[in-house]
Amino acid sequence: MTRVDHSGMANAIRALAMDGVEKAKSGHPGLPMGAADIATVLFTQFLKFDADDPRWPDRDRFVLSAGHGSMLLYALLYLTGNPEMTLDQIKNFRQLGSKTPGHPENYETSGVETTTGPLGQGIATAVGMALAEKMLAAEFGKKAVDHHTYVLASDGDLMEGVSQEAIAMAGHWKLNKLIVLFDDNGISIDGPISIADSVDQVKRFKSTGWQAERIDGHDPQAIAAAIARAQKSGKPSLIACKTTIGFGAPTRAGTAKAHGEALGAEELKGTKEKLGISLEPFSVPADVLECWREAGSRGAAARKQWEARMATLSNRKRAEFDRRLRHERPAALAKALKAHKKALLESPQNVATRKSSELAIEAIIPAMPEFLAGSADLTGSNNNKAKSAVAFSAKTPKGRFIHYGIREHGMAAAMNGIFLHGGFAPNGATFLVFTDYARPAMRLAALMGTGVVYVMTHDSIGLGEDGPTHQPVEHLAALRAVPNMRVFRPCDAIEVAECWELALNRTDGPTVLALTRQSLPQLRVMAPSDNPCSHGAYELVAAQGKARVSLFASGSEVEIAVAAQKELAGRGIATRVVSVPSLELLLAQPAERRKAIIGAAPVKIAIEAAVRFGWDAVIGPDGDFVGMTSFGASAPAKALYRHFGITPEAVVEAASKRLSSK
Ligand SMILES: Cc1ncc(C[n+]2csc(CCOP(=O)(O)OP(=O)(O)O)c2C)c(N)n1
């Protein structure tokens, strides 16, 4: 550093963090104050970024995994000159509508790569980003893709279980461009972490296939030397940076008191005096700001060089790269699915929907090179690996199927990172019941709006013998309750193709495809270009005459509804069947359409091999529900459907009872 020394620059971060938290009267000053030296070295000497163009595709990614330390990131964005991060935004920390929310939100603030806050998510998401970088570089070459992913992680990040899943994958895949800076301050909310943890993080990471070392996190030379070593490593790197939380605070430094509350006027004054910072709130000396702004524009040259390199690619390759990064789907996708549906109509497939999904994937893959499937060790059961798909590995980075291992949570978090990085449309698979193991990352997907697809097979008691531990009953309702999560439970091969199409074209939020283990008949005899699943539900079988009964069902229970409809019609009771591949999408339709689909039949019955929760919105509190009220049991599927009374006979009986009491 020339005119301004390192500590002057680091202190600018500390000052803004302290003042921002003080004004908001809430927030976390301790981490930004402790990690300011690490961040200063990283941003001024290593991070490849251009503050003027925060979305430049070949920028290095920086993930603040310890999202509670958000003021660190906001201070860096302001100091380096991100056009949207003004000083007023810093002053509005944690206020409604500001670009400085309590925890970093990727959809609120340019320059924030991913939402963080739930500890462990950031580092796990970053693994997905580094994976996407490696795969995209293998496909488009280093001219186009050659950047690092840096993470700042805290004790809490490394204590969370998902971090183990994530680092194990990164080590196994040799994601050597992933560099984690561990803010090793030994303090969490309850006090010193020694009260709850005695893991040697350096040994832990080393045993997981990482390069790992310990340094003094307040020594700029040591930080720089360690990052330089990490950049040369053939493995992902952990740099455990010993720091003092709340660095500089006279009484709170090094204590849990520095973690998550404003310092208060006296402590703040004392800190500023100790560090030689102006007492004027939100003031950054002009020469310090100038140096920071230089750091912010340092990457402009690298960006221009990248643009020059991109200009040497063929027009076709360049256009494809841009399309992929924009998450724009290829024109060939719609054509491929249209042909696939036509073939299904000509030659119906009475197979499990997981198998129909495999058939759809086989049709999709040649049309969509960004399709990136994976499974948490259930590949043969989830049916989402195309025959042609090669497994990804450190040695085969062009492989487009990912064996995530038995790591549902790590898989879901990595998928977020893959999508956020850009260039791929990730889908990941396990059993529906194990969405419980992936939920925190699925929730973040919905919050951030990542267009990922979860291929969730074995979606009910219909999976049979594995029993209640494996049979989801509450999961559909739970997933439907997540805002911006789309849940599809298709009933046959045509609906599966339609739902895949909707899922892949949804790039602003995640989609769950709930698929069966057991075979189902192909019920659909038409595949109109206006995809009926796009409304969430549609009339599959019309009533003969004015309907007295409407049957609503999803997935495997549509077959039951159709059988009941036949029986009721035979008895002269006009009955219609409404297939409901997506309950929440139906409920989100404009009122007129929703009313038309739900209809006005006096008797409404819903059938789903799951709990009733949510269905009242369609059938009303007095409508009949044929489904589950308890956990399942271990037995063949047919026996279970009989045992739990989810049968055409039960539906017919419920309808008859209702009609006789009308
Ligand atoms: C999954 C999850 N659990 C709990 C919390 C609440 N929380 C916020 S910070 C924190 C721990 C703070 O310790 P550390 O990670 O070492 O951060 P530091 O004290 O160094 O700022 C906790 C428990 C959270 N954000 N995410």
Image: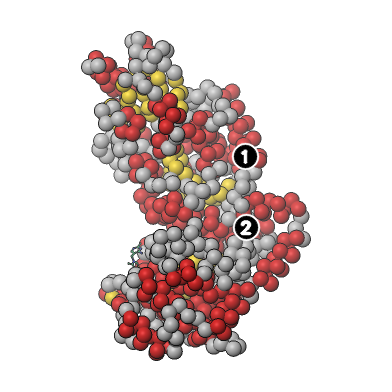
Residue at 43%, 37% in the rendered image: 588
Q: Which residue is mark 1?
A: 333
Q: Nearer the viewer, residue 54 or 276?
A: 276
Whichever of labels 2 and 1 marks the residue nearer the N terminus, that label is: 2
Q: Is mark 2 within 8 Å of ligand 1?
A: no
Q: Nearer the viewer, residue 393 or 594?
A: 594
Q: Quadrant of ligand 1?
A: bottom left
**Quarter-of-image position of residue 406:** bottom left
Residue at 60%, 88% in the rendered image: 2
Image x and y of residue 331, in percent: 66, 40
Q: Going by the image, does 44 lie left or right of 571?
A: right
Number of numbered discs present?
2
Disc 2 marks which amino acid? Leu
User: Is residue 315 in sight in this rendering?
Assistant: yes
Disc 1 marks which amino acid? Leu
Q: Residues within 10 Å of mark 2 (few under 14, many from 20)?
A: many
Q: Nearer the viewer, residue 525 or 329?
A: 329
Tell us which disc is closer to us: 2 or 1: 1
Q: Which quadrant holds the N terminus? A: bottom right
Provide the secondary structure element on which disc 1 rests. Answer: helix
Image x and y of residue 639, in percent: 30, 29
